[in-house]
Amino acid sequence: MTAQTGPDPATRDDAGDRAVPGGAAAPVLSAEGLEVRFKGRGDRGVARAVDGVHLDVRAGEIIALVGESGCGKTTLARTLLGLERPTDGRVTFEGRPLSYTGKALKAYRRRAQLVLQDPSGSLNPRHVVYDAVAEGLRIHYGVTADEKAKVADALARAGLRPPERFFLRYPHELSGGQRQRVVIAGALVLDPEVIVADEPVASLDASVRGEILALLLRLRDDLGLSALVVTHDLGLAWNIADRVAVMYLGRVVESGTVEEVLTAPRHPYTQALLSVLPEGGVAERVVLTGEPPDPTRVPGGCRFHARCQILASGEADRAGIADRCRGEDPGVLPAGSDSHLAACHYAALGEPAGT
C-alpha cells in the first residue's frame, strides 16, 4: 500500500469536523450476511470470495473499503450493485431486498451507479463525450427532449465547465483527470443516490488525484450522495472517508470511523498495513510473511493467524489466546454499529494490536 497519510488540505478538513451530514443516518445500501462463492478450476474446490459480510452504507456518507489485492473488495462492490448474485445473504436498498428480475434490477441501477478505475478502458474511444455521458440516459429513458440539458448539467457537476466545450471531444483528446470526470458525469446524469467507485484515482497522476477526491467530497456535500470507495490506498481513505472497513480474505476484519481505524487500529492486519506508510502512527514496520491464503482453502481459526505478528511474536501465547487464534473463528463483524470493531481475539482483550 502506497500513499501519504494525514490530511490533504485539498480534500479534507480538520478530522474533528468530518461528521456525516445529519448524524447517524439510516442505511441506504446494506450487505446482510453476504456470501459469494465461485467454483474453482478442476479440483480446486470453491473460492469464498466474500465470506459473510455485513456492511451498511448510510445516507450521505463515504465508506472506504480497503485491503490487499484479492481480498474480495471488488467482488463485494459488484454484488452490492447487482452485478454478481450472492450465494447466500442479501443486498438491501433503502431497507428492501434487491430484486434480480430484469425490470427491478434496471430500476435499481439508475439509483446505484458504478465508477470504474480506468477511464481509458471504460470510455469508448469512438464515442464523443456527449454520447458517453448520454448513454445511461438513453438506456433507461430513450432519447428525451431534456437530454442535452441533463448531459450539460452532469458534466458541469463533474467539474467540466463550460460543458458544451467538451461535447464533441473524444477521450484521447482529454487528460486523464478529464476522462475520469467524464466517467463520473456518466454516473451523475442518472441522479443516483449511491455511487460505488472502484479505485477511482488509481490510474491518475498524483497531481490530479486530490482534485478528483475533492470532487467526490463536493458531490457528497452538495447532492447528499452516498459512496463506497474501493481502494488499496489508506492515504486515500484518510482523505475522503467517514468510515473505513478493512477486508481480509473475504471478510471485514475491522471497521470504524476513519480516525479510529487509521490512528488506533485494533486488528493486527490493519496495523501491518499502516506500518509501511510514512507517518502511519505505528512504532515499527510490520513485515507480513507469505501471501494471503487461497480463498478455496480458508484456514481454520482466525483466518489471519498464519501471518499474524501477534501470534508470531509470542504475545498471543503470553496472553493465553494462541490456541483460540489457531482454532476458534472470531466471527463476522455486525453492521450498523457506531463502535470501533475488530474480528480479533487479541483485540477482544482490550489491548491495541501490537502493544
Image (cartoon, rainbow, N blue to C red):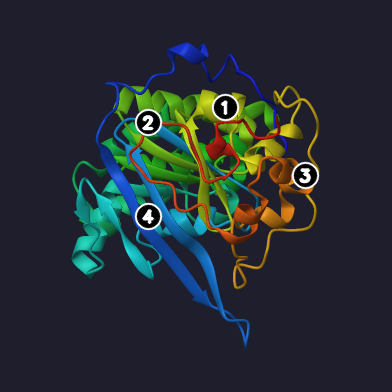
Amino acid under disc 2: Asp
Count of picture labels: 4
Sequence order check, earlier mark of 2 and 3: 3
How many neighbours does mark 1 have within 10 angstroms: few (below 14), some (14-19), or many (20 or more)? many
> Where residue 40 sits in the image (x, y, percent)?
58, 80
> Where residue 3 sits in the image (x, y, percent)?
70, 32
Q: Quadrant of residue 174?
A: top right
Amino acid under disc 1: Trp
Instruction: Indicate which label's residue lies in the foreground, 3 or 4.
Output: 3
| 327 horizontally vs 240: left or right | right
Q: Identify which residue is drawn at 22% across, 63% down.
A: 99
Q: Which mark is residue 338?
A: 2
Residue at numbered disc 4: 80
The secondary structure type at the circle numbered 2 is loop
| 107 horizontally vs 250: left or right | left
CA–CA distance between discs 3 and 4?
39 Å
Q: Nearer the viewer, residue 278 or 104?
A: 278
Question: Considering only vertical position in the picture, is 120 above or below 41?
Answer: above
The secondary structure type at the circle numbered 1 is helix
Q: Identify which residue is drawn at 55% across, 49% down.
A: 247
Q: Is residue 159 visible?
A: no
> Where residue 17 sits in the image (x, y, percent)?
44, 12
Q: Which mark is residue 238?
A: 1
CA–CA distance between discs 1 and 3?
32 Å
Q: Which mark is residue 314?
A: 3
Sequence order check, earlier mark of 1 and 3: 1
CA–CA distance between discs 4 and 2?
21 Å
> Where residue 159 sits in the image (x, y, percent)?
45, 27
| 131 horizontally vs 117: left or right | left
Amino acid under disc 4: Leu
Amino acid under disc 3: Gly
- Residue extending furthest toward the bottom: 42
